[in-house]
Image: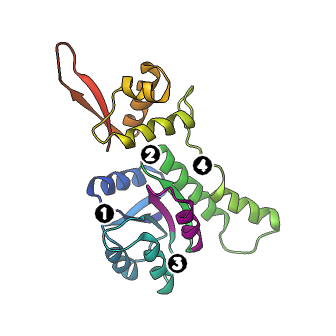
């Protein structure tokens, strides 16, 4: 079993991440902590194989956590989990040993794929020497390969990203009609994507009462 430490300051998100990790075969959560300092203290006592690390913590930046871990000799691998889209942050993350980078909000399928690729990487770099360049390339490809999440038939990543972008602009929630109009698709199409995000644990439905008839459903990022 691959042991994982979840480092996330938001309680609901931390619990969601814990549940997601434990749904992936071959992985177990060794602990959940809410700050960089707690992560450092935990790992000095009990090293783990992998850290699912939020970069924006209340006491220190996640990259500072990585630097402190390396300085103290803790060599756990890291998957950065963050809403940061600044490519300079991505570059800095790579420089301190972050193996993979996962943008919030994400679906279970996205995290599952990252973990599965990580498990494949670990299994391909066991003891012994590589037979040649090809074996090294295959090991790195398992970790760094394309990370497009599997989507239901007929759905595209570009449209899903567009829906997520609109949801991030509307903390109060969006209806399928509003989301569809914003990205140029029909209400039915927008609702399909919103329902997919709800089934994946990224959004939840909020009924909005305002007039006669059935209430309108709003979709809100968790």
Q: Residue 108: which numbered mark, if any?
A: 2
Residue 79 is a magenta residue? yes
- Mark 3 → mark 1, Cα distance in angstroms: 22 Å
Q: Is residue 133 above or below residue 147?
A: below
Q: Residue 147: which numbered mark, if any?
A: 4
Label 2 neighbourhood size at 10 Å, few (<14), some (14-19), many (20+)? many
- Mark 1 → mark 4, Cα distance in angstroms: 26 Å
Q: Does residue 81 appear anywhere in the picture?
A: yes
Q: Is residue 37 above or below residue 194?
A: below
Q: Residue 220: which numbered mark, if any?
A: none
Q: Earlier in the sequence, mark 3 or mark 2?
A: 3
For disc 1, the marked residue is 9
Label 1 neighbourhood size at 10 Å, few (<14), some (14-19), many (20+)? many
- Mark 3 → mark 4, Cα distance in angstroms: 24 Å
Residue 183's spot in the image, x, y percent? 48, 29
Quarter assignment of residue 198: top left
């Amino acid at each position: 079993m691959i042991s994982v430490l979840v480092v996330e300051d938001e309680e609901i998100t931390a619990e969601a991440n814990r549940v997601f990790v434990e749904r992936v075969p071959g992985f177990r959560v060794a602990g959940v902590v809410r700050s960089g300092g707690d992560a450092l203290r935990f790992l000095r006592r009990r090293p783990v194989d992998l850290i699912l690390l939020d970069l924006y913590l209340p006491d220190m930046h996640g990259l500072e956590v990585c630097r402190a871990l390396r300085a103290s000799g803790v060599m756990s691998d890291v998957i950065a989990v963050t809403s940061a889209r600044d490519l300079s942050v991505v570059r800095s993350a790579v420089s301190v040993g972050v193996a993979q980078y996962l943008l919030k909000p994400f679906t279970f399928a996205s995290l599952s794929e990252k973990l599965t690729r990580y498990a494949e990487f670990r299994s391909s770099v066991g003891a012994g020497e590589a037979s040649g360049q090809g074996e090294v390339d295959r090991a790195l490809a398992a970790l760094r390969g394309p990370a497009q999440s599997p989507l239901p038939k007929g759905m595209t990543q570009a449209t899903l990203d567009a829906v997520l972008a609109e949801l991030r602009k509307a903390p109060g929630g969006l209806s399928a009609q509003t989301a569809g109009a914003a990205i140029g698709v029909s209400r039915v199409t927008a609702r399909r994507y919103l329902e997919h995000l709800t089934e994946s644990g990224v959004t939840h439905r909020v009924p909005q009462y305002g007039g006669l008839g059935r209430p309108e459903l709003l979709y809100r990022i968790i």
